[in-house]
Image (cartoon, helix red, strand yellow):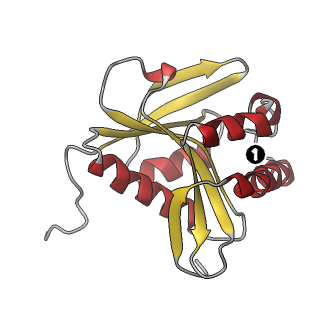
Amino acid sequence: MSEMYCFQRAQETDIARVMELIEARVRWMDKCGIEQWNTNGYLQAYPEAYYREELNNRRLYVLRGETTKRVYGALVLREQDDNWDDGESALYVHNLVADIDEKGAGLYMLSFCDVLARAKGKSYLRLDCDKRNEKLNRYYALQGFAAVGECTDGPYTGVRRQKDLTKGCNCCREE
């Protein structure tokens, strides 16, 4: 983490940078041999028009450097998700992307989402990730997101994960 961040709703001028981040992440996945966005038609399913629509619906958020004003990450936050048709009170994280060179940016965005979900009185913070991406699944598990099922969307099979916000955290308790 090279500077302090602000997590805020995206602006029209952020769209080009969001697309840059996604395209860089796809190239990185190819280079690293990770099968996810680069192999399941992500850019076709989520083109620039999708992000513009999410911006217009006030669901696209960015992680911005406080001093540089540079966008280091982005995600979409929703209060409903068809992959989770259970009626629970939750906030859903989609399309999370972080700058490859900005270590900790993804975790910072997840932390902001956790705070926002709690402030909205949500019981869960939820997301999904590609079933084949073992490293990312381990990462989310370490962040407190339990695997609770699978979802499919065309060629994509994801692991549904949720963080239970009703139990509080263990970070401040004495042993």
Q: What x and y, as percent, mark residue 167?
A: 19, 47
The residue positioned 66% from the left and 79% from the top of the image is 68
The residue positioned 16% from the left and 67% from the top of the image is 173
Amino acid at the residue labelled 1: Ile
Q: What x and y, as percent, mark residue 137?
A: 54, 44
The residue positioned 42% from the left and 59% from the top of the image is 111
Judge from the rendering whether residue 59 lies leftward or rightward of residue 15; answer left or right.
left
Q: What x and y, as percent, mark residue 42?
A: 76, 34
Judge from the rendering whether residue 123 lies leftward or rightward of residue 132; answer left or right.
left
- The answer to which quarter of the image holds residue 2 is bottom right
Kindly give the residue lying farthest to the left in the view shown.
Answer: 174
Q: Quadrant of the C terminus?
A: bottom left
- The answer to which quarter of the image holds residue 14 is bottom right
Residue behind mark 1? 34
Q: Nearer the viewer, residue 140 or 82?
A: 82
The residue positioned 30% from the left and 31% from the top of the image is 89
Q: What x and y, as percent, mark residue 134?
A: 60, 43
Residue 50's place in the image compared with 112, above or below, is above
Q: Nearer the viewer, residue 63 or 99?
A: 63
Judge from the rendering whether residue 145 lies leftward or rightward of residue 67; answer left or right.
left
Residue 87's place in the image compared with 19, above or below, is above
Residue 48's place in the image compared with 144, above or below, is above
Judge from the rendering whether residue 50 lies leftward or rightward of residue 63; answer left or right.
right
- Tell me if mark 1 has few (under 14), some (14-19) or many (20+) residues whose alpha carbon lies within 10 angstroms of its own: some
Q: Quadrant of the N terminus?
A: bottom right
Which structural element holds mark 1?
Answer: loop
